Image (cartoon, coloured by chain):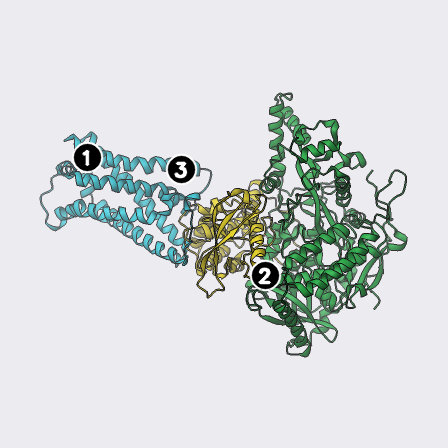
Chain colours: A green, B yellow, C cyan
């Protein structure tokens, strides 16, 4: 099947308006006759469910958590971008569009990104109307912060809990519809398959996580807002339950999976402390505005630190290597996430990691504390040479800006970041890849839509800070509710979809068989045993830096691990009860397939772009020597994979990316 | 560290349930409390026993999914943290740790340490929202300036993660801190004024129907709340409710 | 407005209102009793006024009785209801970590105070009612002081009195602030109010105890 992205004709800036004006609509009376299933209740799924219900559709919403409010969008810290230009600093729809495409290393679809920038301003209006308490200035107007190295301040925020506040906004919109009976909410339900009837998505199979009951749910269209698949690495900043299962089942039913290798490794996370580690915690990117990143210059100091004979504060200024400032004098500590992560890995691989595992660098606030302290001393007319006073004043400023993050760090690491530098290390954070969708956000399965992080999205090969929240809400509030009408307008006479058909029966049967297999398998290893091993392979060979040898090995190792998993996995308990191990088993089974496709995608993409860094595609000389090298001639396409059984048999379809409004350039942060 | 754990085990909602003792060794002080339970579960699975069921998801203190009543306190002895952020360095070698589910009639136990907190959702369905449709044509976000102090106080109320520690800690199993926080958030913002009367009446009515106890102002909720939601929010809800009642 | 007493907050509000009224009464009661230490005449005069003025006798007195009975009954109803809100108790509960003993034991301090009130009423108030309305005698406007002194002659009564007021102090230490919180007053004055609360909650009971001891030992 050839990929049709269905991008409307006409000038970039008019595409969305024109498209909205010309697509088919469903009249209000008929919307009552149409059911829509929304899986996932994060920013994308939650906002979509609420909006579809407001429009009049009968919505059934599903989440595996005990309440829609717990979806992992809640953990987003920094903020949400919007081209409001409230600061009057020259921001515009075009500029947000341009920054997003450039930040994504020219691997996203122009038309989608432009639309995203266009609706971004509406999101802020909508959220404020819902009662989302964004940060405000003393004049009562909304405050903005700058983020991720762009040249304007366009990020709206609510302290370090922006994701939480936006999600609670979407959740409240859902609540209103649940109260009215327009959304039927299914908490603690996990989707385990998509059901297709006559080629169209017409329902899903779910498992009630409390009773174990397998249920059939039908609808005229199915929307997946099920998030990213970062947990394929076992350790990531994702929630423990975040999984690829819904997206992967859709893939197996015919939805192409795009760019699986595009993964964002976030540079500022709390390092792994030991084998017991279950997840990683992010420290907001905003910290890099004030923190300086360094490792010792001399190996002997590194050894002394690891042996606890030396404290980082005892290392003299001239014996420190501020490697980002050294390598990228123009952007310094504010280089994009992918660049900062790779630089940290480079230093640690060279043996300069500062914790016991050798995988940590320092993020130091001492100079920011001194700078702010002097500033405050001057403002207050106090003695700027009194070191103790300056330090105290500076710490107060830093506390006001990052207090909650510093406290979080202290609770986890048991070291006071006001006194000693933080230790950080990159960790898997976000997946730009996902289910392929066209301009209408429909997958290659008619009637099956995919929104938010779960789709291959608007972020290309790298996502800018504060753009994930923007995309999730744009998809759910302002894009999908329009575009889905175009498809559903054909369904006004269809009537309710029966679940008593052979398609539902077959899907249910295959789901049950798999669950029974897990319960009955006499294995010897827990699910986590396999998940951890998969994570190790992924991190070591398909992580921040990739090469042909490693990727080839990874493909073989994951395949072998998958085979072992199906022979040796052990799941306690029964099917008919709350059984977390059983739920995990199904998720890890899917990760074991996705992981292989992921590595295969990385192997095929013989260029470095955004989060995907290939050691064989770097600048060979000149000022940029050693930096990532993109290959626009051969790889300016979206890699959409079609399922054919084993991941190794997956067929690659290419959606060529056209850049009419933007000139492709090599990114430089020197 | 070596520890003795006394954990509530209950097969399902109908089972009577009981405390069961477990021994666990080689616990690292750097582990989070839930990672310690992960290790216990791995041990149980490997020896053919049923792992202990407990709720958790984000493991960074924001989703509100984790719970647990640890040594007589919701989210354990540390302050300003959820159980997933509680670290084992808070305990000593040889300690005995009681681990129980959050207890309230309105939070029935589903299995072991997992409870059903959907009562919170139903309270929100009753009025935890501002009725505004998604149109893309709402007024500009800066059209109504909001006093910074009100905005900040609304934000503080809105940081509630809905974990239920307030109910678990309250000797009366009262949900007033949770409901008060939500009522406050909207009461403090101009956008929330229009529906203020109905909102507080409906939410309190639903809260009462769910079987939560009444507030006697012990303040335990505020102390145990991982997000430090203030008792002021309960007072604000009380006055909002009384205003609404007298309005009719 | 209808059915406000059926809602949790409405009941809380009613508890607080009756408490505030009772605390006001207590203050007034104390103000008159303390006169007995300084001036028997003034004490007699005030007591006589309270005992004979129609508005006090036929409006405030019934309200007071209703207030006491309401506060007591509602307190018990709420306690029983609140207990039902948690059917399985914790195996281990560390209440001291997050709340005061007083706040958790209002029912017990309250019941003790109620027990004292019954004794107190049967001894003094019932006597008043009998003298005034059941078998009226000629009113002697100076009898109050003597009766008071007589009352505190017994060490048993003084002992009971002291215990009761200690419990009252404990009850008030939580109850005073709690009443304001319940009626929705938690604002910038709350901190100051907490100070007032401490002074009142300890000062008034100690004052009553002082009066009892003074009369016990002074005559």
Q: Nearer the viewer, mark 2 or mark 1?
A: 2
- Position of A335 compared to B169: left or right? right
Name the subunit of mark 3.
Answer: C
Kind of element beneath mark 3:
helix
Of A292 and A331, the residue lying toward us: A292
Of A115 and A314, the residue lying toward us: A314
Kind of element beneath mark 2:
helix
Instruction: Tell me the residue that label 3 is attached to.
Output: C194
Task: Please report contact status of discs 3 and 1: CB closer than 8 Å, yes or no.
Answer: no
Q: Nearer the viewer, mark 3 or mark 1?
A: 3
Give residue A153's quadrant in the image: top right
Q: Position of residue A644 (x, y in %)?
A: 79, 68
- Position of A548 compared to C17: left or right? right
Please rate how many residues cluster around mark 3, counting C-alpha atoms within 10 Å: few if below 14, some from 14 to 19, many from 20.
some
As drawn, the label of residue A580 is 2
The CA distance from mark 3 to mark 1 is: 31 Å
Kind of element beneath mark 1:
helix
Look at the image and tell me whether residue A29 can be seen: no
- Position of A396 compared to C154: left or right? right
């Amino acid at each position: 099947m050839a990929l049709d992205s269905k991008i409307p004709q006409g000038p970039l800036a008019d595409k969305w308006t024109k498209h909205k004006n010309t697509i088919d609509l469903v009249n209000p009376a008929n919307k009552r006759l149409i059911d829509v299933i929304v899986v996932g209740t994060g920013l994308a799924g939650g906002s979509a469910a609420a909006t579809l219900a407001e429009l009049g559709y009968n919505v059934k919403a599903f989440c595996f958590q005990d309440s829609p409010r717990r979806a992992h969008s809640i953990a987003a810290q920094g903020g949400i971008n919007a081209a409001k230009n409230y600061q009057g600093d020259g921001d515009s729809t075009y500029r947000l569009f341009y920054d997003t495409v450039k930040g994504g290393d020219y691997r996203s679809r122009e038309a989608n990104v432009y639309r995203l920038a266009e609706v971004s301003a509406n999101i802020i209006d909508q959220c404020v109307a819902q009662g989302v308490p964004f940060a405000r200035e003393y004049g009562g107007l909304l405050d903005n912060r700058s983020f991720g190295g762009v040249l304007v301040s366009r990020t709206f925020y609510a302290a370090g809990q922006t994701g939480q506040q936006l999600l609670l906004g979407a959740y409240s919109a859902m609540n209103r519809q649940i109260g009215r009976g327009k959304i039927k909410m299914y908490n603690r339900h996990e989707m385990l398959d998509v059901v297709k009837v006559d080629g169209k998505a017409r329902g899903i199979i779910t498992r009630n996580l409390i009773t174990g009951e397998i249920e059939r749910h039908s609808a005229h269209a199915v929307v997946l807002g099920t998030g990213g698949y970062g947990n394929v690495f076992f350790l990531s900043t994702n929630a423990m339950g975040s999984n690829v299962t819904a997206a992967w089942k859709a893939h197996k039913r015919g939805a192409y999976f795009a760019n699986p290798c595009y993964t964002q490794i976030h540079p500022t996370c709390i390092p792994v402390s030991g084998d017991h580690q279950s997840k990683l915690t992010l420290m907001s990117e905003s910290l890099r505005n004030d923190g300086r990143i360094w490792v010792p210059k001399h190996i002997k100091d590194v050894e002394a630190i690891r042996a606890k004979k030396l404290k980082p504060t005892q290392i003299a200024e001239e014996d420190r290597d501020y490697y980002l400032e050294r390598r990228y004098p123009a952007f310094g500590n504010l280089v994009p996430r992918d660049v900062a992560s790779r630089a940290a890995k480079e230093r640690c691989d060279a043996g300069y990691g500062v914790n016991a595992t050798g995988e940590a660098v320092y993020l130091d606030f001492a100079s920011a504390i001194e700078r702010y302290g002097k500033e405050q001393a001057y403002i207050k007319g106090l003695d700027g040479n009194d070191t103790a006073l300056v330090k105290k004043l500076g710490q107060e400023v830093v506390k006001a800006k990052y207090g909650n993050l510093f406290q979080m760090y202290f609770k986890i690491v048991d070291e006071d970041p006001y006194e000693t530098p933080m230790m950080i290390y990159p960790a898997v954070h976000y997946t730009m890849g996902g289910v392929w969708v066209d301009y209408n956000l429909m997958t290659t399965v008619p009637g099956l839509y995919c929104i938010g992080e779960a789709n291959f999205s608007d972020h290309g090969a790298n996502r800018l800070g504060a753009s994930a929240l923007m995309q999730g809400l744009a998809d759910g509030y302002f894009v999908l509710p329009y575009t889905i009408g175009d498809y559903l307008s054909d369904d006004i006479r269809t009537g309710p979809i029966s679940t008593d058909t052979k398609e539902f029966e077959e899907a249910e049967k295959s789901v049950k068989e798999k669950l029974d297999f897990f319960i009955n398998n006499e294995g010897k290893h827990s699910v986590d045993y396999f998940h951890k091993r998969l994570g190790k392979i992924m991190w070591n060979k398909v992580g921040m830096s990739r090469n042909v040898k490693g990727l080839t090995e990874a493909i073989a190792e994951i395949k072998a691990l998958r085979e072992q998993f199906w022979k040796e996995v052990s799941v306690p308990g029964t099917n008919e009860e709350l059984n977390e191990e059983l739920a995990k088993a199904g998720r890890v089974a899917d990760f074991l397939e996705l992981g292989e496709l992921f590595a295969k995608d990385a192997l095929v993409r013989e260029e470095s772009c955004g989060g995907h860094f290939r050691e064989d595609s770097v600048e060979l000389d000149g000022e940029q020597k050693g930096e990532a090298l993109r290959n626009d001639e051969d790889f300016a396409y979206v890699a959409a994979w079609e399922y054919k059984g084993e991941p190794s048999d997956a067929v690659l379809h290419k959606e060529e990316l056209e850049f009419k409004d933007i000139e492709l350039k090599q990114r430089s942060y020197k | 560290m070596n520890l003795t754990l006394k954990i509530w085990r209950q097969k399902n909602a109908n089972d009577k349930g009981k405390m069961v003792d477990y021994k666990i060794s080689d616990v690292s002080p750097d582990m989070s409390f839930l990672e310690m339970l992960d290790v216990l579960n791995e041990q149980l699975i490997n020896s053919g026993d049923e792992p202990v069921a407990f709720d958790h998801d984000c493991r960074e203190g924001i989703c509100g999914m984790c719970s647990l009543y640890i040594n007589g306190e919701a989210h354990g002895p540390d302050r300003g943290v959820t159980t997933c952020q509680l670290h084992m360095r808070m305990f000593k070698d040889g300690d005995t740790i009681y681990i129980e589910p959050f207890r309230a009639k309105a939070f029935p136990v589903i299995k072991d340490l997992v409870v059903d907190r959907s009562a919170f959702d139903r309270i929100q369905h009753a009025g935890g929202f501002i009725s505004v449709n998604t149109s893309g044509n709402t007024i500009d976000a800066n059209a109504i300036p909001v006093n910074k102090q009100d905005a900040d106080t609304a934000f503080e109320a809105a940081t509630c993660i809905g974990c239920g520690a307030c109910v678990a800690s309250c000797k009366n199993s009262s949900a007033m801190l949770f409901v008060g926080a939500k009522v406050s958030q909207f009461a403090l913002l101009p956008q929330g004024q229009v529906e203020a009367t109905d909102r507080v009446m409906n939410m309190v009515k639903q809260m009462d129907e769910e079987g939560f106890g009444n507030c006697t102002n012990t303040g335990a909720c505020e102390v145990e709340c991982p997000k430090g939601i203030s008792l002021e929010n309960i007072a604000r809800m009380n006055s909002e409710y009384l205003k609404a009642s007298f309005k009719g | 407005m209808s059915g406000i007493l059926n809602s949790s907050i409405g009941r809380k509000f009613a508890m607080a209102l009756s408490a505030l009224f009772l605390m006001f009464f207590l203050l007034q009661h104390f103000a008159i009793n303390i006169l007995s230490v300084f001036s028997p005449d003034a004490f007699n005069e005030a007591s006589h006024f309270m005992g004979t003025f129609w508005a006090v006798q036929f409006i405030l007195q019934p309200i007071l009785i209703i207030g006491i009975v309401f506060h007591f009954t509602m307190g018990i109803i709420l306690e029983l209801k609140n207990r039902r809100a948690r059917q399985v108790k914790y195996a281990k509960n560390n209440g001291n970590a997050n709340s005061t003993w007083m706040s958790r034991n209002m029912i017990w301090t309250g019941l003790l105070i109620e027990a004292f009130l019954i004794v107190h009423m049967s001894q003094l108030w019932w006597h008043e009612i009998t003298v005034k309305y059941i078998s009226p005698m000629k009113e002697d406007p100076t009898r109050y002081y003597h009766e008071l002194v007589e009352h505190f002659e017994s060490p048993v009564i003084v002992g009971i009195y002291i215990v009761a007021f200690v419990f009252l102090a404990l009850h008030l230490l939580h109850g005073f602030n709690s009443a304001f919180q319940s009626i929705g007053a938690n604002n910038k004055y709350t901190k100051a109010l907490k100070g007032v609360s401490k002074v009142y909650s300890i000062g008034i009971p100690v004052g009553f105890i002082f009066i009892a001891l003074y009369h016990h030992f002074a005559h």
